[in-house]
Each structure stands twice: as C-alpha cells, then as structure tokens.
Amino acid sequence: MNKFLLSLCACATMTAGAYASDNGWSPAGDRIMSQWGETLDPSSVLPEYPRPIMERESWLNLNGLWKYTIINKGEALPSGEADGEILVPFAVESALSGVGKRLGDAKELVYTRTFTVPADWKGKNVLLNFGAVDWKADVWVNGIKVGSHTGGYTPFSFDITEALVKKGENTLTVKVWDPTDRSYQPRGKQVNEPNGIWYTPVSGIWQTVWLEPVSGTHFQNLRITPDIDAKTLTVAPETAWATASDMVEVNVYDGKTLVSSARSINGEPVQLTMPADMKLWSPDSPFLYDLKVTLYQGGKAVDQVTSYAAMRKFSTGRDKHGIVRLHLNNEPLFQFGPLDQGWWPDGLYTAPSDEALVYDIRKTKDLGFNMIRKHIKVEPARWYTWCDKLGIIVWQDMPSGDRNPEWQNRKYFDGTELKRSAESEACYRKEWKEIMDCLYSYPCIGVWVPFNEAWGQFKTPEIAEWTKRYDPTRPVNPASGGNHYTCGDILDLHNYPAPEMYLYDAQRATVLGEYGGIGMVVKGHIWEPDRNWGYIQFNSPKEVTDEYVKYAEQLLGLIERGFSAAVYTQTTDVEVEVNGFMTYDRKVVKMEEDRVKEINDRICKSLEK
C-alpha cells in the first residue's frame, strides 16, 4: 500500500447506524464522516473556551442537545411538543446535528433548552454569547425577548440579567430564519441546490453558545495593534457602561516574565513600550506575548481578561528590481498557501472538535506552506488562535452574497459591477465591518479580501478604500480574481489549472490568488458516488504530485517575473469537488507529502536574501 495513503481498512467509513448514544442521538444520513465525527460525544461538544483572545475564567458552555421545531415563517413560537432534538452547535442540515433537514426561506427553526445559573454568579450580570448563527436570530429568555441579530459569521452577545428567574431553571429560545441564496445576505458557497463548487446550506447555530458572569461595567472587545517600528503595542478597550474614572491596566508577559505595563483612564487606548529586543512573530517563529487586561472602577478590579498579542507588521514595498512585494516585518516574504474552504462532511461549517479544527492548519504547515486563504467563510475564534500559535498568515475573504455580475477576470476597468439594492449594500457593509472588528486583533490576519471573482462585487474602489481606511495596518486585496480596478494594494489573478501571469501591476503587488485544482477520486471517501468534479483528474498520488510539482516549478519562474504570493486550490475535497490535498473526510492524503514540502519550502523562501 502506498505509504502516503492512510490505511483504507483502518479508516472504513462509519455511518449513522454505527452509533448508539445513551440519549438516543445519532448523526443523520449516511454520508462519509471524519474520524472526529465518528467519535463525537454528544455530552461534551466543543468544550473548550471559545474566545481565547479575550478569555474569562468563569463561564458555562450551552452546547449539547436542545429541542427544536421547524415552523412556517411568521408563525407564533410553538407551545406544544417539539419536533425532536438537535445537537448544538451543528447546523440543522448537517449530519452531526442529528436532524439533517433543509430549512429553506419559507420556514424558521426554533431552538429551546433550559439552564440554571451557577449559585456563585450571584450579584453578577450574565452575558449570553453566540459564536455565530446563520442568519437572522431572535432570542428570548423566559419568554422575554432579549435581542436580535443578523449576520451569519460574527459573534454577538446579550445581557440577559433582567430576564433571569431568581431560582431554578431558565428557558432559552432562539428562532432562526435563513434564506440562503434566495436573498442578498453574505452566504459564501451555500446554495439551495448544491452542485459543482456550490455546497449544502448551513442554517442556524453553528458555533458555541455560552454564558459568562460579568460586572455591570465590563470589557466587550479589545482592539490590539502592534507597531514594530515604534516598538509599541496599543490595546484599545471597548467597555460596556464605562465611566470617566474607570482605569484599564495592561500587563505584557514573555512567559512568566513581565516585560511591559501601562494604564489609561477615560476609555483611552493603553500604549505600551515593548523591549528593545522584542520578539517578532513570523511563520518560522510564531512568538506570542501573553496579556492580562484589568478594568478598575473606584480602585476595585471589576473585570479581568487574558489575551495575547504578536509584534509583527504586514505591508508592501519594492525589492531591488523595483517589483512591489508583500512584506512581513519590513522584509519581502513570498506568501504561499492553500485555498481553505473550511467545510466538513459531518459538521458542514462546524468542525467536530478542536482537534479537528487544528488538524487542517497543522497539515498545511507540514506541507511547507506559510499562508492560508480563508475562502469566503469566517471561522470560529479558536481557528484564528491556532493560526496565531502555529504561525500561518491568513488572507481573510468576505463571504460573498447577492448575485454575480459579468466576470471580466482578464481585463482592467471595464468589468460589469453589480448594482445592489440599498438593503443589500447596507447588509454587506454592516457584515464586513463586523467581520473586520471581530478579527482585527488576531496577529495571523495578513490581508483583507472584500470580493472574490465578481461574486456580488460592487463599488470596488469605494469598498477597497473604506477597508484600507478602517484598517490601515494590513494590505487590501480588493477583488481576488475579480473585476480589476486600480485600487487597494494587490492585483490578484486566477488561472486554472496551471499558473499564468497575464496581467501585471507595477504599482501594486501582483499575486496568483487561485490556481491548481488537481483532482483525484478516492473510492470510499467521496461525498457522492457518481458526481465528482475537478479541473483535471489523475488516478494515483504520484501522478497528482508530479502535476503539482510541475506547476510549482512554473510558479517559481513567475515569481522572478513579479508574482508576490500564490494560492493553490485546495486544502481538502469539498462535497463533489475532488481537488484537495486530502479527501473530504481527512482520512487520505492524496499527494506525496515529502515532495510537496520540498518544493513548497523553495517557493516560500524564494524572496529571502
């Protein structure tokens, strides 16, 4: 057996019938499963604290089995028997939800569960936190509406203190509506009729739900900005119910050693001076400083969170030949990585476990890459923390939505942009800002990508300018492979299957945002038996690797001519796409890893002095 294939015998596909949970839960359907989905314990689902970049000691995880009912859109909340149980936080369409049903735009999904507030939280305010819910969520506690949220990719919280009962169980109800591709909202690759590069809808709660106790005045967010040139680190706290006399203290640690400390009042950012010999973050040395951030009111500590930061700088600059290159820490670095969709055969948008979540990142590093393009999806917070820890640069796409205008990939200026409705444009702007806000402080985020291949592309120069103005610390890739305009910091070309440079911009970094797509079907590890798609297909790991190395050698030649980054399609197979380094269930690696790593290392180091 080829040493680069995992044992197919040891990885025989487990179907829903193989489960026998004590509480009656089992995955829905008979699709392929990952090893982590096969061993999932429904009583301990994603038990890790979900937001490491702003972590509190005390919290209560609400993941697990909830009751669910599907109702007609606009109906009153159900009062009778539920339709069944759903495993949160897996979308209702997924196997791991235990439901496996499509919702559609004419229906709404209603979740209910009970919880008891821990006795030692007495006197505290209680926050109800959602990692992400797709798409419109209305929330009640004990029949009292506590809030609503739209947006399928960003976290949100409600202070539910006044709605809680003093003793005993509380009832939590969440109603979700998700029209998928029958409306304008950002949705990425979700469609109601999956085919080719378009995938199964994801509706409802798909990230961790949790409670945590806080004081009335507490941190809501930390905006962390490193400046390696000035040797400073700025922590700007966003605080609920702040007063002018509140004081924020930030302590920075290298391991257990305190290396910097500073305070501010009146909501001002805290600016810290970093050591002269500060440690820089890079893919080869992903060093993180630990932070302890404390909020004082009247001299008393009322909130404290732990966090982390990295000293690093993303920018562009010219090399000795005058070519504009992407820079990390003021040095050119060729950024090279896979297109990462972040889909799972059993959990769809949601990885079955934290071990599964980090697996793809580790494998990307093992293959010699230094970057991931997170393709029209936003991941849970822990995914970005793992990229920070392991040393992977992330190009973050905005999930696409609305309709697709004419695509003019090989032309400048004359691409036809979408004319969005006022509601559609407002939705895009709101959700893009929220995505940037929630991801701003993660060191790994290296490039913002507002549009992909003209999918919903509109007002490109204006959106690129706003993105750059809102976050001037990172390059902006205005339209990856899309309709091209002279804006932002990057010109991004797509070409399948082989790399090709058919346009060049002497004023911006020129990159190859997608290429490759080399396919291979591995029987027993495919989503559908008769419908599999790739740009080109081969039959063995050697053939696939030979083609990959051929393209990589071509790419090396194009780097000399001006390419400053490249993205290979893709990390894993996804549904009927079979062009991943790995099968969709992650049980088979389809290329010869040592050969891939050798050529990838050469590419990543191609701009080093």
Image: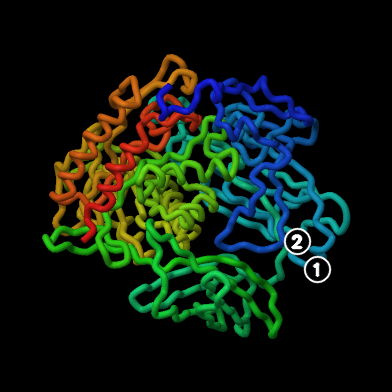
Rendered image quadrant of residue 325: bottom left
Rendered location of residue 527, percent (x, y)? 48, 23
Let me know if residue 334 appears in the view.
yes
Q: Report which residue position mark 2 lands on.
A: 161
Alpha carbons under labels 1 and 2: distance apart? 10 Å
Q: Is residue 303 above or below residue 400?
A: below
Q: Nearer the viewer, residue 539 or 578?
A: 539
Relative horizontal placement of residue 44, taking residue 608 as reference (left or right): right
Q: Which sits earlier in the primary sequence, circle 1 or circle 2?
A: 1
Which residue sits at x=39%, y=27%? 577
Q: Quadrant of the C terminus?
A: bottom left
What's the residue type where badge 1 is placed? Gly
136 above or below 535? below
Badge 2 element: helix
Residue at which label 1 appears: 123
Q: Is residue 216 above or below residue 112?
A: below
Nearer the observer, 381 or 386: 386
Numbered disc 1: secondary structure: loop
